[in-house]
Amino acid sequence: MSAVEARPVQVHAVVSGRADGPAVVLANSLGSTHRMWDAQLAALEERFRVVRYDTRGHGESPVPEGPYTIDDLADDVIALLDRLDIERAHLVGLSLGGMTTMRVAARNPERVNRIALLCTGAQLPPREAWLDRAATVRANGTGAVAESVVQRWFTPEYLSTYGSSRKFHENMVAATSAEGYASCCEVIAEMDLRDDLSSIAAPTLAIAGADDPATPPVKLEEIADNVQQGRLLVVPDSAHLANAQQPDIINPALIEHLEQQ
Ligand SMILES: O=C(O)CCC(=O)CC(=O)O
């Protein structure tokens, strides 16, 4: 069998904000779309050219046949920057989007200004759990995991108070392509970015949700401690989608970090 050449995918992207502002690229998590950044949009658009995109296999982006690697996801970001004629950008990524961001920052430092990594990890074992989740989703669809995923995205108090947000996020997971979701689970199963951390020179803000069961604060502490210029912020009363649960804390922290010279 001949090897299939990996090619960047033309990911679906939405560009808004200040056309003359510095570019910020927002990279989504597993099972979400660019809409996961809704609570950041107004604050960032005032200052930046905001580029939100759907990771391959998600939202309106193509769903190429798997397996994918973390380098494929990083290549998609570089292709997006090329397509939009952006020489350098700030990168902000949550969970899988944070992993993609770390890989780009380590591998293509010439394309990156400052980065923010939310609720993510340089490695997320056990590998078997991701492969099991991929198999479940291929067999039963993303609808089968939507409720349990969203229970890790938000704290129980938030979910019982904000029923419409709960529904919005469950629908987002359930609308994700099963093949795309499963192939990205396989990216997480195989990825290990721990050796990349010391090559990340971009000033890095690592943001953890204090109650995140998926990527607990210790994962962000590992990142902040091992990149060249890292800072850790632990956000109270938030789980995995801390940006959606605590925008009033996260938005000013992002802006303050990205606007530093
Ligand atoms: O959110 C991600 O991109 C990966 C971690 C995850 O899937 C959280 C979870 O649902 O357990």
Image (cartoon, grey):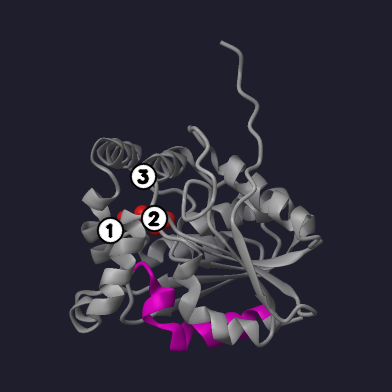
Q: Circle 3 sits on which residue? A: 125
> What predominant SS class does the magenta segment belong to?
helix
| Residue appearing at x 50%, y 32% in the figure | 65
Q: Circle 1 sits on which residue? A: 149
Which span is picked out in magenta? 240-258
Residue 13, can we see it? yes
Q: Are marks 2 and 1 in contact (CB under 8 Å)?
A: yes
Q: In this view, does 190 lie above or below 32?
A: above
Answer whether residue 256 is magenta in the image: yes
Of label 3 and label 2, which has the lower sequence position?
2
User: Is residue 113 left or right of 198 when viewed as pictured?
Assistant: right
Between residue 233 and residue 133, name the one nearer to us.
Answer: 133
Q: Distance between the residues labelled 2 and 1?
A: 9 Å
Q: Is mark 2 on a helix, strand or loop?
A: loop
Q: Is mark 2 within 8 Å of ligand 1?
A: yes
Q: How far apart are marks 1 and 3 (CA)?
A: 17 Å
Between residue 7 and residue 74, name the one nearer to us.
Answer: 7
Q: Position of residue 33 (x, y in %)?
A: 46, 61
Q: Where is residue 148 in the image (x, y as percent from the top left)?
A: 22, 58
Q: Circle 2 sits on which residue? A: 31
